[in-house]
């Protein structure tokens, strides 16, 4: 293991994890043995470590107190917007509810009206059924003329003679 | 009843995190606690976004967006992990979405304000010529900063985020894996490749001891 390139992918990952203190005891011992045997591995660790330290030069920004205030203000604005939307939604919901109640009342009134009408108004169909026996013999009744005429016929015993003849 | 609740709360290791306690106060409607959280994390968050995306304005917008999402999620907040892990998971998703929306366009040009803040010259003026990329060359800090920034920029998004969380936030592999929704093994591999890439890119500027 004289050259860095001979390290396996796993060993290279372990080297980095070793630098980060992320290996357990046995893995750490294994890496330390590797480092003890290989000057190239030691050099690699050194280079990895120094390159990592160079990242300290990366900028770290401090947006300051103003940023905190701006963030809180933005948050309040969003929350207020949400509350306004919720309030609008509430008004709309209330209006819908009132409209629905009115519609339900109207529908109930219409249904009650129909029911009452059905119960109270004369039913022409039923009237015709009731009158059917009379209608059926209407021609005969019209030829008789009147009830007085029939009673007169009965008083003259005309039907009794006819019945006796028939017998 | 409150004793039971206290015992339950104490049994949760995440509650030992002072920022989790602040977040629980935010959940109870304490706006001051939220301002404290913003103050605690704003610098770190803006720095990470800045180093991810290379633009200060975008970095500040995303940091605000991140805090806003945290605030909006307060009612359903449950302390299951460290606060920072949750925050950086949101930050990672935001950064990924932003990078995707930017497409291949690179936002590398720094504003005059950024240049002043970094005490660095514009990229085109400070990038050393190839002849200058010799280990023995004495380069000034501004130039080195630019080189380091370019080395970071050469990493892919996931490598860069893992590096920043590890370097800036000193997060463990386990915490990074949680924040980036990866396995710890994947994070180990990601950081190994990232550090190899950095070592190669910065080789000309790193002199081995001895």
Image (cartoon, coloured by chain):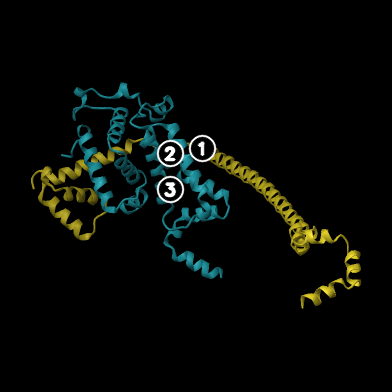
Chain colours: A yellow, B cyan
- Badge 3 marks a residue whose secondary structure is helix
Q: Is residue B202 visible?
A: no
What percent of the width, then of the height, locates residue B124? 31, 22
Foreground disc of the pair 3, 1: 3
- Badge 2 marks a residue whose secondary structure is helix
Lateral position of residue B35 relative to residue A115, left or right: left
What percent of the width, then of the height, locates residue A11? 16, 50
Q: Which residue is drawn at 31% across and 33% down?
A: B149
Badge count: 3
What percent of the width, then of the height, locates residue B72? 52, 48
- Which residue was labeled with disc 2? B46
Chain of the residue under label 2: B
- Badge 1 marks a residue whose secondary structure is helix
Lateral position of residue B164 relative to residue A11, left or right: right
Q: Residue A67 carries which label?
A: 1
Q: Are marks 1 and 2 in contact (CB under 8 Å)?
A: yes
Q: Few, some or many C-alpha atoms within 10 Å of disc 3 (few <14, some 14-19, many ≥20)?
A: some
Q: Residue at x 26, y 46 (%)?
A: B190
Residues at marks 3 and 2, CA–CA distance in whole angstroms: 12 Å
Chain of the residue under label 1: A
Q: Can residue B24 be seen in this view?
A: yes
- Which residue was labeled with disc 3? B87
Residues at marks 1 and 2, CA–CA distance in whole angstroms: 10 Å
What percent of the width, then of the height, locates residue B101? 39, 34
Q: Which residue is drawn at 8% across and 45% down?
A: A2
Looking at the picture, tell me which residue is in the foreground, B186 or B54.
B186
Residue B209 is drawn in which quadrant?
top left
* Residue sitting farthest toward the left: A2
Residue A77 is drawn in which quadrant?
top right
Q: Few, some or many C-alpha atoms within 10 Å of disc 2 (few <14, some 14-19, many ≥20)?
A: many
């Amino acid at each position: 293991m004289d050259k860095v390139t001979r390290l396996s992918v796993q060993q290279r990952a372990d080297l980095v994890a070793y630098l980060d203190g992320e290996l357990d005891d046995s893995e750490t011992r294994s890496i330390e043995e590797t480092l003890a045997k290989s000057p190239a591995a030691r050099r690699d660790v050194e280079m990895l470590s120094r390159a990592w330290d160079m990242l300290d030069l990366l900028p770290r920004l401090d947006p300051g107190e103003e940023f905190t205030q701006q963030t809180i203000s933005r948050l309040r604005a969003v929350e207020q917007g949400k509350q306004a939307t919720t309030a609008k939604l509430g008004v709309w919901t209330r209006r819908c509810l009132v409209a629905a109640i009115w519609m339900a009342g109207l529908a109930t009134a219409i249904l009650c009206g129909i029911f009452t009408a059905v119960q109270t108004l004369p039913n022409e169909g039923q009237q015709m059924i009731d009158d059917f026996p009379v209608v059926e013999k209407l021609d005969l009744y019209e030829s008789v003329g009147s009830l007085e005429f029939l009673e007169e016929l009965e008083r003259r015993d005309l039907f009794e003679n006819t019945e006796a003849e028939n017998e | 009843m409150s004793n039971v609740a206290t015992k339950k709360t104490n049994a949760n290791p995440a509650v030992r995190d002072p920022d989790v306690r602040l977040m629980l106060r935010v959940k109870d409607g304490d706006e001051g606690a939220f301002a404290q959280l913003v103050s605690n994390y704003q610098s770190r968050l803006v720095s990470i976004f800045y180093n991810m995306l290379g633009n200060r304005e975008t970095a500040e917008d995303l940091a605000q967006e991140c805090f806003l999402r945290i605030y909006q999620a307060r009612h359903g907040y449950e302390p299951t992990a460290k606060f920072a892990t949750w925050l950086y998971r949101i930050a990672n998703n935001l950064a990924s979405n932003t990078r995707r929306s930017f497409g291949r366009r690179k936002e590398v040009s720094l504003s005059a304000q950024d240049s002043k803040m970094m005490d660095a010259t514009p990229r085109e003026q400070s990038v050393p010529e190839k002849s200058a990329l010799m280990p023995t060359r004495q380069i000034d800090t501004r130039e080195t900063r630019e080189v380091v920034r370019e080395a970071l920029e050469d990493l892919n998004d996931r490598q860069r985020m893992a590096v920043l969380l590890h370097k800036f936030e000193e997060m463990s592999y386990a915490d990074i894996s949680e924040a980036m929704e990866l396995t710890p093994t994947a994070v180990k591999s990601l950081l190994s490749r990232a550090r190899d890439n950095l070592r190669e890119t910065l080789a000309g500027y790193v002199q081995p001891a001895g």
